Amino acid sequence: MAYSTPAYGSGSWGGSSSPYDSCVQQCIASYGSPMASYTPPTATSTMASSGSGSGMTHTVIVAPTQGVLRYVPFAINASVGDTVMFVWNANEHTVTKSSELAICNETSASPFASGEQNKSFTFTQMVNDTNSTFFYCGTPGHCEKGMFGIINPPNAAMGSNTSLSSMMPAMVANSSTMSAMWSYTNMMTSNNSAAASWGSNIDMSSMPEWAMSLVAENVMYSRTFLAANPETLDATGNVNLGAAGSTPLMVPMDITAVMSNSTSNSTAAMAAGSSPSTSAGSTTPTTTNGARALASPNMLAGLITLAAIAFAL
């Protein structure tokens, strides 16, 4: 499926309205978000911690934009001999190996660490086994906010009550924040069943309790990203960012922004209801977080364009 770069205020994307566009409009109405565009420059430096493998290369984006503390995708499946290439798209982040029981602490078992790097840096790691490998951002405070990821995540047995899909209903029921994130994710993935179920079988049984909700957040964010870029996800659930070629990738707003934007919009709506109404013919644009809210049926507000990182793919 081909995508064209959306022009701000053009009211078009790919030439026609689509179910995904309509879904995004629901999210805009509920949560709102600014819109921006970004084209990353050519890589400035590269570090290979263990050489390059002879198999596939899996690309992981380190922070898709400044302030979004995520690795995208959150988890990848890789075989022995494959190479994982981490590509920085924001400043002051690391890729540091950890473990499932101590996700935010550097491990001494076959460690790898990029050191703190900035936008356009790349770091490669060859896969030597298929054991679950956790990694995190060592910049103070980032991992604790959810900036960690997994190579070959642990998979739960079919029907297991320790899988993410089995545990998610309780998480949603017990947290209004998680419930809002879940509703947003469901809207964004409503027309893509593969994206909507991505990560469902991740086994949570050995993960520390404090990290479980963050795993869920990361999976939900990756789902919205994959729904926005369906060509990067195959039918088996494997992610290949290289499938986009030179087509820009769409980056949704961070999942943690859902609550703050929803609250801001609700407050604004209440204020508008108590203030004098404007005339029906008024052309004054409304604003959401500083971005003009354009009344276009296809506008993809809440999405940031990220050019596919061709040099890394």
Image: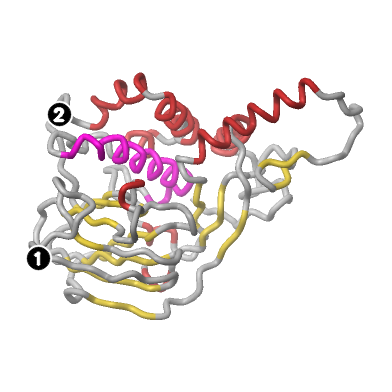
Dot 2: element: loop
Near-viewer residue (204 or 154): 204
Magenta highlight: main SS? helix
Quadrant of the drawing holding the C terminus:
bottom left
Q: Which residue is tagged 1?
A: 110
Residue 262 falls left or right of residue 66:
right
Q: Locate residue 73, reporting x and y percent.
A: 34, 51
Near-viewer residue (157 or 92): 92
Q: Which residue is tagged 2?
A: 158
Residue 158 falls left or right of residue 31:
left
The tag on residue 167 is: none
Question: What type is the residue that disc 2 sits on?
Answer: Met
Reply above or below: 277 against 156.
above
Q: Residues within 10 Å of mark 1 (few under 14, many from 20)?
A: few
Dot 1: element: loop
Q: Is residue 62 magenta?
A: no
Residue 28 falls left or right of residue 159:
right
Magenta-highlighted residues:
207-232
Q: Locate residue 79, reporting x and y percent.
A: 15, 58
Question: What type is the residue that disc 1 sits on?
Answer: Ser
Q: Locate residue 305, reporting x and y percent.
A: 55, 56
